[in-house]
Image: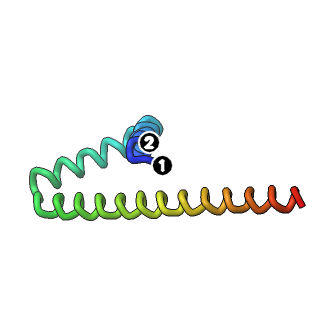
Amino acid sequence: MDMSAFLSEVMGGIVSFVQGNTIIAIVIALILLYLIFRRTKLFIGLLCLVLIVALLFYLIGNLAGSGSERKKKLLEKEQTQSDSQ
């Protein structure tokens, strides 16, 4: 999965969450606004933490996806070889 597909999937998830849970989304937005204006250091630290975790999940998903595709191709290749014998 490339980065643009990943970002569009994440944004789609955020939009569906906000549409389904409007009150919770408003509370989260208010908390973020409070952190931005009153506790900027804490906000920047949390933002960095969230970005690092998101990057790790992206890398894990990307590596697992390529590994499963390789395994699938190897199994298909093995199956075609056993069918031809």
Specify the quadrant that holds the C terminus: bottom right
Q: Amino acid at mark 2?
A: Ala
Q: Secondary structure under badge 2?
A: helix
Asked if the residue at tag 1 contacts the one at tag 2, i.e. Cβ–Cβ closer than 8 Å, the answer is yes
Q: Is residue 48 left or right of residue 26?
A: left
Q: Position of residue 7 (x, y in %)?
A: 38, 44
Q: Position of residue 10 (x, y in %)?
A: 42, 45
Q: Is residue 64 left or right of residue 36?
A: right
Q: Which mark is residue 1?
A: 1
**Residue 69 falls in image quadrant:** bottom right
Q: Few, some or many C-alpha atoms within 10 Å of disc 1 (few <14, some 14-19, many ≥20)?
A: few
Instruction: Please tell me which residue is depicted at 17% across the width and 55% down the height of the picture.
Output: 35
**Seen from this angle, which residue lies furthest top?**
19
Judge by depth and name the residue closer to the eye, 78 or 32.
78
**Residue 45 falls in image quadrant:** bottom left
Q: Secondary structure under badge 1?
A: loop
Q: CA distance from mark 2 to mark 1?
A: 6 Å
Q: Position of residue 61 (x, y in %)?
A: 48, 59
Q: Which mark is residue 5?
A: 2
Judge by depth and name the residue closer to the eye, 66 or 38.
66
Q: Amino acid at mark 1?
A: Met
